[in-house]
Every structure is written in structure tokens, then in C-alpha cells.
Image (tube, coloured by chain):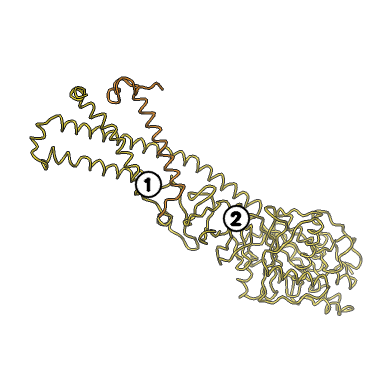
Chain colours: A orange, B yellow
């Protein structure tokens, strides 16, 4: 059965919000010293938000 | 580069694992939501609803439409994505586990001799797994937050919309009534324009707040005030189509009852004629929602205009005459019911008189020539008048009592209904030299004087409001005191119909009771 449009819309919205949250978390972690090593240590990933 | 890898190999494995986790999560998401989704179909949701709330006798199954995403589908999506992620992650571990721990790809000692390789792979997989599951739980949190927010918004909106609709139904009398089976429901069923499937409960709910999506994919408005104009309304009992706007416009039902030959049909046509004239003067449209009503009205109005006698109503004739007063959203559907007098006395006619149970106002047509006192007065010197009037033979109190007791037996709260007691053939009665007062209270007193105590007293006890009228179908007096449209206008305006030059609202000029007034002291 074809997925109805409202289901697709909801899914896209939830996935976009999830990705946005993950991006925020990622950028946040990039600025945290103890975890900076895992993500990329010094610059160039370091971003001030 | 090699030096960097040699010194930071585990760190690189961890970093790569992090990106691998992102990819793993995205693949699981894609598979769960797009490639191999699991959909909750309308049929499955309906089955769940029926299982949770079994359908009782006389109830309808829940409608077949797509439910809100947040009701069940969001939870299914989370479960499916989780299952895909677990499967993918296990598959990623299969080769390393077989190789490093189970020894299925050569000696375990050999692999552990190359210590950095197994450790790097395990770090890579562990970091990837941790990050993938972390991403999944973020998705889980976001999805749940959306569900909570959606419920927090949709439930109050649903409650508000339903309240507004309920209030509209109550104040505007917008029930749906079928003129074939006389079934009345708060709202009708509506037919899907795509697949013709019936939706029995179109109210805002878990299938949609403002619109719902039928199983076939067609969008339907959820409020009866909108659906009435965009969809075909259908009777929930006999599945016959109802007039356009049903469920959205005012729907008034006025049964006209009385004894055989009391003048019910004559009154119906004469009052309709009066209303048509009033509407024409005010530029209000009157049309007929079905061909049968149009033919019946055409015939009846011709009879009134030509002054012919009204034929006796057949027991098999259609009881309802419907017309629409005004046009568009402010119009009113008005149904006048007239059944043959015999049916009120026939036990088998019970079903055919179901319209009595749902009338907002009733008209009782009383033939003055059937009143014993009047007959006695005329028998001596004007017996021909009784013959000419085709007087009803029965006792008017019995005719009234049969309907009143039926209403009581059916559990109909008659105290919510208004009753117009109409003294018919008043022009003929005046022709005999007898007079009847024109004002409501005076007519009631006159009825008491001529011996109809039971009728007057029980009517006032059993109905919310009773008014008395005298009507003539031909020789209406100059002040329109005997206008047959007045009782009808009184009942219509009492239920919110706005009529210009409303005769009922204006105090009627009471004609002085003469010494000829029937029932006066001799």
C-alpha cells in the first residue's frame, strides 16, 4: 500500500528535527574538552556556537 | 601519515567508528521509514478500535480512514527502525566475532597475535554501535516529543471543535432527518467522493481534526457544517441521500395532526401558500429539495389558488413535504408532515407516524364543526353548513389524546415541543353566523366554553408552549387574523427562522366577541 502523504510529512519532519538535534549535540560536544579528542581534537572542527 | 596511524591508530578507529555509526543509523532509518516501512492501514486501525470498543447493537463500526501519524504510526516507525538497526549492527559484528572469538576464519591465536587489528576493529565497531544507538535514542526522544506535543495540541483543539459543533447543533437545530424513514440523527453519514464509502462519524477526532483522509486517499472535511456542502449526506438508517446542506443548516420538522377531515392537508397547503407569498415579498428563495415535494407543493398551491376542495389524503401518500427557505448557509430545511387521519387510529400506522416523535413543533388541526356544542347549535337551523364543511366525525379530544399519549409512550419530551392548536374552516363557521375570537387566550377560553376542557388543560400541561389560532384557507380577514401562515410562522420563528413581516410576532388584533360567539351564554 502506498504511504499516504501525511505519514511521509510527519516522518520527514521528525527526521529533520532529529538531524538538527544531532547537529547541535555534535557541535556542542566539539567544544567540550574531554570529548574533543574523539571528535577531532584541536580545530578545524571546533566551532563556537 | 603512517606514523600518525601507528601512534593514533585506536583513536582513528574510534573516529571512523563514529562516522560508521552515523551511516549505520541513517541506513536503519532509511530502511525502516522508506525502503521497508510498516504501515498501519485503516483496516488494521479499525480492527484495533473494534477490539478495544466492541460495536454494540445499532452502532456503526469506526470509519475507515487513515489515523493520525502520532496515534500509532509513530510508535510503529520507532520499533521498525530499532529492529533494522539491531539487525544491521549484529550483521556488522558477525565476521569479527566469528574470526576473533569463534575461530571460524583461521586460528584465533593468529588474529590475536596481530593484536592491533582485532582491537582496532572492536574499537571501531563498539564506537560505531554506541554512536548509532545514541543517534537512535535521540530519534526516539524527538519522535516521542512530537507525539506528546501533537497530543497536547490536538486534544484541546478536538475538544473545542466538537464543542463548537455541538453548540451549533443545539442552537441551530441542525440535525439530519430523512423524509423516507423519518430517522433523525445529530449528523448524517457522508459519502466519500472517491470511493462512495460512508463515513458515519465525521466529527474531528483521531482520524483528523479539520480534514480526514479516507482509505481511498480522498480528503473529507471533518465538520458537518462544511461536509454538508461538500459531500453527499446519507441517512444512517436507510442509506438514502439527503438534501444538500444536511447537517449544516437548520432542520425543522413540523407534524400536522388531527382527526379525519379536520382540514390538515388544506392547512398545510394554505400555510405553505402564505409562507411562499411572505418569502416572495421579502425576496427570500423557496425551493424544494426533492421532486416529490416539488410536485406535491405545486399541486397543493394550485388547489389553494383555484379555490378547489382538497382531496382526502391517501394512507399510502408520502407524509412529508420539504422545502428550503432562503439559500446558502443561512437557509433552513423545513419539513411539514401530514398523514391520513385514519393512520392515527390504526395500530399498524405506528411506524408510519414516527415523524411525530421528532417534531420540534406540532400543529393540531381542530375542525370546529366536529365539536358537539357547535353541531348542536347548527343542527337546528343550519345543518347544511355541517354537510358543506365535510366535518370531521370524531371527537376532537380523542384525536388529540391519541397523539399526546403516543408521544408520552415513546418517551418524547413533549415539554420541549410547542403546540399550535389551529381552529380550521373558520371562514365557513363565520358563514353560519357563529363567531370565534381571534386572540390565542380568548380562543382557549372559547374552547373551554364549548366543552373541550380536557384538550385545553392537557395541552397546556404537556407542551412547553401552546398557542391557539383560527385559520381560513380562502377568505382571510383584512387584518390577516385568520392567515393560515401565522401558526407556521410562530413555530418557525420560535426555532430561529427569521421571517420578514412576521405576522406571528406582531400582536394580533382581537376581534370583539359578538353575541354570536359560539358557546356564549344563550
* Element carrying mark 1: helix
Disc 2: which residue: B230
Residue A29 horizontal side relative to residue B437, left or right = left
Q: Tell me residue B94's x, y (percent).
A: 19, 42
> Which residue is nearer to you in this view: B192 or B489?
B192
Q: Tell me residue B462's x, y (percent).
A: 68, 60
Looking at the image, residue B370 lies above or below residue B42: below
> Which residue is nearer to you in this view: A29 or B363?
A29
Q: Look at 35% across and 22% down and name the residue there.
A: A46
Report whether residue B52 is seen: no
* Element carrying mark 2: helix
User: Residue B34 has which mark?
Assistant: 1
Q: CA distance from mark 1 to mark 2?
A: 34 Å
Q: Quadrant of residue B334?
A: bottom right
Looking at this view, name the residue that lies furthest to the front.
B1
Looking at the image, residue B206 lies above or below residue B236: above
Q: Tell me residue B390's x, y (percent).
A: 80, 77
Amino acid at each position: 500500500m502506498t504511504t499516504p502523504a501525511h505519514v511521509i510529512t510527519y516522518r520527514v519532519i521528525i527526521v529533520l528535527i532529529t538531524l538538527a538535534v544531532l547537529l547541535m549535540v555534535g557541535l556542542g560536544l566539539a567544544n567540550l574538552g574531554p570529548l574533543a579528542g574523539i571528535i577531532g581534537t584541536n580545530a578545524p572542527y571546533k566551532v563556537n556556537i | 601519515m603512517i606514523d600518525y596511524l601507528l601512534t593514533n591508530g585506536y583513536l582513528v578507529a574510534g573516529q571512523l567508528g563514529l562516522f560508521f555509526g552515523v551511516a549505520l543509523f541513517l541506513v536503519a532509518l532509511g530502511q525502516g521509514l522508506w525502503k521497508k516501512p510498516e504501515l498501519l492501514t485503516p483496516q488494521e486501525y479499525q480492527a484495533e478500535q473494534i477490539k478495544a470498543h466492541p460495536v454494540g447493537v445499532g452502532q456503526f463500526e469506526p470509519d475507515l480512514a487513515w489515523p493520525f501519524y502520532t496515534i500509532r504510526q509513530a510508535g510503529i516507525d520507532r520499533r521498525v527502525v530499532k529492529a533494522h538497526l539491531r539487525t544491521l549492527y549484529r550483521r556488522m559484528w558477525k565476521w569479527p566475532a566469528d574470526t576473533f572469538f569463534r575461530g571460524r576464519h583461521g586460528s584465533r591465536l593468529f588474529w590475536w597475535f596481530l593484536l592491533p587489528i582485532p582491537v582496532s576493529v572492536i574499537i571501531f565497531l563498539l564506537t560505531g554501535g554506541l554512536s548509532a544507538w545514541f543517534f537512535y535514542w535521540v530519534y526516539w526522544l524527538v519522535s516521542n516529543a512530537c507525539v506528546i506535543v501533537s497530543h497536547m495540541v490536538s486534544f484541546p483543539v478536538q475538544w473545542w471543535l466538537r464543542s463548537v459543533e455541538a453548540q451549533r447543533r443545539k442552537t441551530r437545530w441542525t440535525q439530519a432527518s430523512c423524509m423516507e424513514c423519518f430517522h433523525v440523527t445529530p449528523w448524517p453519514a457522508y459519502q466519500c467522493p472517491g470511493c462512495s464509502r460512508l463515513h458515519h462519524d465525521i466529527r474531528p477526532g483521531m482520524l483528523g481534526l479539520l480534514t480526514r483522509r479516507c482509505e481511498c486517499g480522498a480528503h473529507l472535511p471533518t465538520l458537518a457544517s462544511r461536509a454538508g456542502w461538500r459531500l453527499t449526506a446519507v441517512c444512517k438508517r436507510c442509506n438514502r441521500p439527503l438534501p444538500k446542506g444536511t447537517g449544516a443548516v437548520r432542520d425543522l420538522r413540523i407534524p400536522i395532526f388531527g382527526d379525519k377531515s379536520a382540514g390538515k392537508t388544506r392547512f398545510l397547503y394554505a400555510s405553505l401558500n402564505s409562507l411562499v407569498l411572505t418569502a416572495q415579498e421579502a425576496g427570500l428563495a423557496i425551493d424544494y429539495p426533492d421532486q416529490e415535494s416539488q410536485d406535491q407543493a405545486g399541486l397543493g398551491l394550485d388547489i389553494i389558488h383555484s379555490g378547489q376542495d382538497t382531496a382526502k389524503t391517501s394512507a399510502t401518500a408520502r407524509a412529508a413535504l420539504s422545502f428550503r427557505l432562503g439559500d446558502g448557509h443561512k437557509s433552513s430545511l423545513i419539513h411539514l408532515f401530514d398523514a391520513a387521519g385514519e393512520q392515527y387510529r390504526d395500530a399498524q400506522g405506528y411506524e408510519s407516524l414516527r415523524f411525530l416523535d421528532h417534531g420540534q413543533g406540532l400543529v393540531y388541526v381542530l375542525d370546529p364543526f366536529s365539536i358537539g356544542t357547535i353541531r348542536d347549535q347548527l343542527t337546528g337551523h343550519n345543518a347544511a353548513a355541517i354537510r358543506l364543511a365535510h366535518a370531521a366525525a370524531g371527537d376532537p379530544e380523542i384525536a388529540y389524546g391519541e397523539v399526546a399519549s403516543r408521544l408520552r409512550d415513546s418517551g418524547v419530551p413533549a415539554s420541549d415541543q410547542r403546540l399550535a392548536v389551529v381552529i380550521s374552516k373558520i371562514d365557513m363557521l363565520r358563514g353560519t353566523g357563529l363567531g370565534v375570537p381571534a386572540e390565542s387566550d380568548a380562543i382557549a377560553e372559547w374552547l373551554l366554553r364549548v366543552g373541550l376542557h380536557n384538550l385545553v388543560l392537557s395541552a397546556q400541561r404537556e407542551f412547553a408552549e401552546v398557542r391557539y389560532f383560527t385559520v381560513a384557507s380562502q377568505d382571510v380577514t383584512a387584518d390577516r387574523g385568520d392567515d393560515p401562515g401565522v401558526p407556521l410562522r410562530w413555530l418557525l420563528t420560535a426555532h430561529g427562522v427569521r421571517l420578514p413581516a412576521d405576522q406571528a410576532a406582531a400582536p394580533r388584533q382581537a376581534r370583539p366577541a359578538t353575541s354570536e360567539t359560539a358557546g356564549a351564554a344563550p
